[in-house]
Amino acid sequence: MADIIKLPEYRNWLHDLKQQIRKGQIKAALSVNSQMIMMYWDLGRQITEKQETARWGSGFIEQLSKDLRKEFPEMSGFSLRNLQIIKQWYLFYSQSELLKTKQLVSQLPLIPWGHHVKVMQKVKNVDHALFYIRKTLENNWSRSVLEYQIETNLYSRQGKAVTNFNNTLPEPQSDLANEIMKDPYNFDFLRLAEKVKETDIEKALVGHISHFLPELGIGFAYMGRQYLLKVGKKEYRTDLLFWHTRLKCYIVIELKAKEFEPEFVGKLNFYISAIDELVKDEQDKPTIGILLCKNKDNYEVEFSLKNINTPIGVSTFHYTELADDIKAALPSVENLQNELINFEREYESQ
């Protein structure tokens, strides 16, 4: 394979390629990520074309890696492994029909290369991959958050809940409200007994708020649990109350540790009306209700929402279920914290 460097065709192409990379280095001072991504795209295209037409042999990419690293020792993207990934990345996205309209290429430079590699490693469908790229741009996800959303299959869950938003909210409010809904919600970070009360789920979710908020999605600001509402002479309490920074409205979340029942909608409708009347300001958008149940029949939910005039979405959730005897044998978070405090005290006293 060392003979390849003697071929005029290869030397001429390598010379032109180095010139392109040098130009990219200069432009990169202004826009590091986008220029690098576009350089990788063009490099992937050229590698693919050369392998198909030049017949330089199986060791072509390895030789190219050596030549580029020698010429650009300060750049870390020309290892054999990364050149192989660049080619794979180009081939993956070049399948897309969006490429013909240039919509795809305009999106790719906007997220970091590490995000691209993560998407390509974990997502096999181009349309699904583009969904995660768009969501990364919209929500400014870190690589770890992106990986979490892929592993919990956000593509299949988002916008799948049953709602009446199209009938109760104006556009584009209804579109955004539908988009924030998932089905099911993934609360697997909770480890609860099989038979559990709604209040236990509430407490556990609030106790794991750093996991709960990312699962809800961007824009949810926690306002409190068991939020007090005084209606007439009686007091009522919502399960969880949030403010949504994009929708500019309150969101009431009610949790039910069993299958959906039509009367759940009536209770949530009452809470929404109370928030609208007693809590929200004039400039706030209408309050939205989200009902989360262990399971549901979609037709029954649609029928229950038919004549409801307040915006309500119904979805399911799941968590890690432990048998009651196993759950009882595990130490609680409080016990673990107390043990840690006692250990630290004993250590300091020595």
Image (cartoon, grey):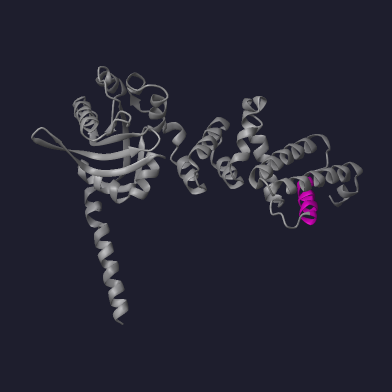
Residue 61 among those drawn in magenta: yes
Outermost residue, front direction? 282
* Residue at figure coordinates x 29%, y 72% from the top left: 343
Q: Residue at x 62, y 31 (%)?
A: 104
Q: Give, as a single range, the part of the protein colored magenta.
A: 58-71
- Taking 239 as reference, is 183 left or right? right
Percent coordinates x, y for residue 48 in the rendering: 74, 37
Across and down, in percent, residue 103 comes to 62, 28
- In which quadrant will I find the C terminus? bottom left
Question: Where 246 falls versus 174 (above or below)?
Answer: below
Q: In the depicted view, which residue is nearer to us: 48 or 112?
A: 112
Q: Main secondary structure of the magenta part?
A: helix
Q: Position of residue 57 (x, y in %)?
A: 81, 43
Vertical placement of residue 301 versus 347, above or below? above
Figure disc tally: 0
The single residue placed furthest to the left in the displayed view is 233
Residue 288 position by quadrant = top left
Residue 331 in view, yes or no: no
Q: Nearer the viewer, residue 349 or 4?
A: 349
Q: Residue at x 24, y 30 (%)?
A: 276
**Residue found farthest to the bottom:** 350
- Residue 164 appears left or right of 175: left
Residue 248, x across and y down, in percent: 36, 34
As displayed, is residue 67 above or below residue 43?
A: below
